[in-house]
Amino acid sequence: MASGGGGHESLRRMIQKLPFSFDGIDGDLRRLGVLLQEVFQLAGVRFAERLAVLNLACGRADETGVLAAAVAPAEIGFYLGMDLRSDAITEAKRRWELPGGEIDFREGNAAMIGRMEGLPRFDVVFIRHQNYWHEPMVWEGIMDEALVALKDGGYLVCTSYFDLEHELLAASMRERGATLLANLRNHTSRALPDAEGKSVDRWVAVWGQAL
């Protein structure tokens, strides 16, 4: 059964080499770990063996360690993070290490993942704080690629800042025929002051591939 949590001893084989850059991130990640545990249990998701995990539009990829903990007792054999921002990718590379596995962070467009050679199909594709309502056409492309990147029986996991953008994402996934396995509101989500109704990992949902 999937388990979660943000403590360093629970991060399995993922090693954090640098502290996080901003106050509040540690608390956000602890809450995200609990949220992932709850949503995986609700979805009936159980992970086994060594996994390939793709983190799209990952930014600094602060959640890398929490993802490693959330898929326990399985371990990550290959982890790839991708984002357009070179400074964020550089920071992610400096922060995370995966002894005994392969970890990579690449600067690039998440909607172009299908054109990259040599990548495996992924057991889990994770997108934290998707921004569907801001650039819907961009995110349509990203979601198409995310579903195609999954192995048979793989899972797409997304979190959202806002209620409306989460609803828009869910509607888009229904149109694709993806199977919604679980959807949870995070009632401990930390409110952010830059917009009304915005909070950290306000929603999380798990989808299976289209039937």
Image (cartoon, grey):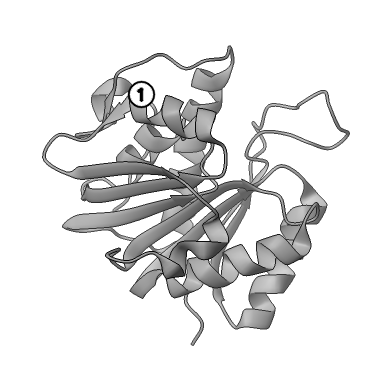
- Horizontally, residue 120 falls left or right of residue 185, namely left
| Residue 73 point in image, percent of width and height | 21, 47
Left or right: residue 120 versus residue 88 is: left
In this rendering, the answer to whether 144 lies above or below 159 is below
Residue 80 vs residue 1, the one in the foreground = 80
Residue in the picture at 83% in, 26% down: 194
What percent of the width, then of the height, locates residue 195? Answer: 86, 32
Instruction: Name the residue: 50% across, 66% down.
Output: 146
Q: Nearer the viewer, residue 5 or 11?
A: 11
Horizontal side, residue 138 vs residue 89: left or right? right
For the point 88% across and 34% down, the residue is: 196
Q: Residue at x 78, y 50 (%)?
A: 163
Identify residue for label 1. Answer: 95
Inspect the image, locate mark 1, and give the three-letter code of the amino acid beneath it. Answer: Arg
Q: Secondary structure at mark 1?
A: helix
Mark 1, Cα crowd under 10 Å, few <14 / some 14-19 / many 20+, is: some
Q: Establish if 83 lies above or below 21.
A: below
Q: Residue furthest bottom?
A: 211
| Image quadrant assignment for residue 201 | top right
Using the rendered image of the protein, determine whether residue 137 is visible from the camera's viewpoint. yes
